[in-house]
Image: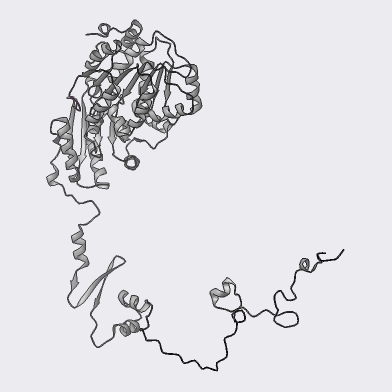
Amino acid sequence: MSFADLGLSDKVLQAVTTAGYTEPTPIQAQAIPHVLARRDVLGIAQTGTGKTAAFTLPMLTMLETGRARARMPRTLILEPTRELAAQVEENFERYGTNHKLNVALIIGGVSFADQDAKLTRGTDVLIATPGRLLDHFERGKLLLTGVELLVIDEADRMLDMGFIPDIERIVKMVPFTRQTLFFSATMPPEIERLADMFLHNPQRVEVARPASTATTIEQRLVATGAEGHEKRKVLRHLIRSASELQNGIIFCNRKRDVAQLQRSLTSHGFNAAALHGDMDQRARMAALDGFRSGEVPLLVASDVAARGLDIPAVSHVFNFDVPHHPEDYVHRIGRTGRAGRSGQAFTLASRSDERSLSAIESLIGQPIAWLDGDLASVSDEVEGDEPRRRRGSRRAKETKGGEETKSGGRSTERSAAPASESPRSENRSRGGRRPAAERSRADAPRRDPVREPEPVAVAPSAPPAPPRELAREPVRSAPERARGERRPPRRDEDGETPVGLGSHVPAFLLKPTGFGKSK
């Protein structure tokens, strides 16, 4: 079957031929006729099988008639990441060379003004991430009442990234009569329930078993028993010994590990770039462009690069961390072995990853072979740490006739003192410090024994106590209170103790006011 048999327009067929494609992939051959027939489609296929072109080509054919209006896009494509959205825009530029369509990319990290200008001119194809799309809608710069076709790409990734509430809100904004397309490499039960909510009598297109891996990828597990330095050392050995290594993507679970591993590889002479979600958009695109062009052979990335990135020439994938979700493993290794090419995928695993490995093998339906030995020969201790019982036994070690202590990293041995000699006097005579226990007892506040209060006899002829005002102590400043000093009593000019302000009455208080004079 050729592309001409799918019902595409002549302009689209000419662009496909110019791009060098002659036969459609299975997902394209089955999905394109249903899309052109205006039916909802639920597409499931392996990553790297051409799902993007499966909805891009029929959309170009359908958009040849009609005209876009200001702030009212005709079609809407939702992507979970900025990189995927930019990649879909590249597909429209490649296959839409013979069309005069306005394509707008609405993603984060880009100026709102430039995006508003594109929306104002009228948009035939709007490619967006959910967050930035809702920002424009809330600002009153966008209306979704004219959307004729809605595409939700990588639906399972939308679930993992927490975009499902935003997707449900967006779906309520578009017309009920729209056409909806779902495409994903995996389809967990949660996504299937959401698809039943969004799709109306969909045509299910499944060209491969969900979450299956391509047969062109050679998968291997590498046993490693340590984190940090030792694990990075194993990775460097794999990169140096890999056969026919042209370029490779190294995946980590955490963003901070991406930056740390990239710095480590660079310090050991490797040309590597980093890519994760906390980087600004310009740095992310620069790293991705450098990897695509071959300027940077190694790309250390988080799962932001695991979904849908079309880089056909990736020869190796290294999983520095075993992914927490089994579906992420399928997407990660799917970056290699694309378009019929062969690829290799290595996963570094320790004993703590046994449960995740079992879930991955259960999902893909086949065991993954080990490269050199399995986890049985690997220690589960982390480099630089000792087992707790070993450290505890060392602390509890006792010597005959003495006691061993640790102080500042040096062990000092002190022999037991005779019972007749006081340890305190011996310690002071040698000029040394007192033991910690003795110092804590000596420095602790002393407590007087509780005594019964003694009765106080009061003479009946005792003079009464002076008034409280006369017995008041002079006011002291803060430094005096800190030093425990008492301020000397104030004296007036005549040497007497002043009453009230004394002779230090301000002049404005002595000025006559004029009140009380008779007229």
Q: Quadrant of residue 137?
A: top left
Q: Identify the image quadrant of the N terminus.
A: top left
Residue 50 lies, in percent from the top left, at: 27, 19
Magenta range: 206-211
Residue 272 lies, in percent from the top left, at: 33, 35
- Residue at (28, 31) in percent of width and height: 248
Whether residue 231 appears in this view of the structure is yes
Whether residue 49 appears in this view of the structure is no
Residue 279 lies, in percent from the top left, at: 40, 36
- Residue at (57, 88) in percent of width and height: 464
Residue 233 lies, in percent from the top left, at: 25, 43
Q: Quadrant of residue 389?
A: bottom left
The vertical placement of 46 against 383, above or below, is above
The vertical placement of 482 against 231, above or below, is below
Front residue of this view, candidates 486 and 414: 486
Q: Could you tell me what secondary structure mostly forms the magenta stretch? A: loop
Q: Is residue 324 left or right of residue 501?
A: left
Give the number of marks. Answer: 0
The vertical placement of 507 against 140, above or below, is below
Q: Identify the image quadrant of the C terminus.
A: bottom right
For this orientation, the residue located farthest to the front is 519
351 within the magenta span: no
